[in-house]
Image (tube, grey):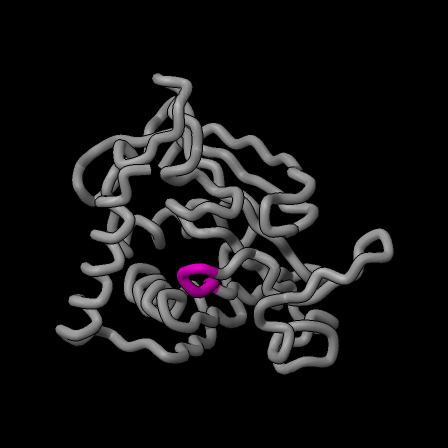
Amino acid sequence: MLSDVVIGDTLGSAVETPNLQTVSFSKNIRFRLESGQRFGPINIAYKTFGKLNEDKSNAVLIFPTLTATPQVASEKIRGKVFHGWWEGLAGKGKVIDTNKFFVICADHFGGCYGSIGPSSINPDTGKPFGLKFPGFFIRDMVNVVIEFLKHIGVRKLHSVVGASLGGLLSLELVALSKNIAKNVFVIGSSHKVSAQYLALNYIARQAIMLDPA
């Protein structure tokens, strides 16, 4: 997929996720969603921890849960400690060791922690997209991530890790791109969901969509 790329930095956010980086693409050639709709430009906010080695073989992609930020590991910036939502597993000397691995964690497409989503400003109206943000699927979210990885120079992953929604995305990633990751770790997720899961998510969506605010 051809696209224009802009890489920048954003300092801070409403949930105190400092030093977010951003990648923007699909400005002129719009990204094609599963619905057939074209959408762009797309910007994805992300954080990295550790260093990418010379042969680029130590990259680990962590898909966040539905409500998690890119701050997957803890870090100290200008004297202030920012705690990672998965600091028990990711960080220096942890299971996902940032001394050994180059850890990438990006906000979801459609998210609200720096990536484009319903709260982003629609350039056509100057107002937040809100419910006019295009509908999208798990596959769309993963296709955006595949494009994002290309733009940060990562073509192969040592591992992909995800819990809950992140687990669904991890499975979809290796289904779409079978050779992209050497290892896949899925937590609290599966290849399909139950009727109860669908019902609870329907209720959650309706609560948002029916909110008069």
Residue 12 falls inside the magenta stretch = no
**Can you see residue 62?**
yes
Q: Position of residue 116 (x, y in %)?
A: 43, 38
Q: Position of residue 58 (x, y in %)?
A: 62, 68
Examine the residues drawn in magenta and state their main secondary structure: loop
User: Which quarter of the rendered picture does the N terminus lie within?
Assistant: top left
Position of 38 relative to 104 (above/below): above
Residue 65 falls inside the magenta stretch = yes
| Residue farthest right in this picture | 79
Query: Left or right: where does residue 82 sit relative to residue 88?
Result: right
**Of residues 61 and 212, which is closer to you in this image?**
212
**Of residues 80 and 64, which is closer to you in this image?**
80
Q: Quadrant of residue 8?
A: top right
**Can you see residue 178?**
no
**Of residues 35 and 188, which is closer to you in this image?**
188
User: Which quarter of the rendered picture does the C terminus lie within?
Assistant: top left
Q: Position of residue 10 (x, y in %)?
A: 65, 38
Q: Quadrant of residue 73?
A: bottom right
| Residue farthest front in this picture | 212
Q: Position of residue 128 (x, y in %)?
A: 39, 29
Query: Left or right: where does residue 25 sit relative to residue 99?
Result: left
Query: Left or right: where does residue 112 sit relative to residue 202?
Result: right
Residue sitting at 67 percent across and 80 percent down? 94
Question: Where does the magenta region start and end?
Answer: 63-67
Residue sitting at 42 percent across and 73 percent down? 163
Residue sitting at 57 percent across and 46 percent down? 152
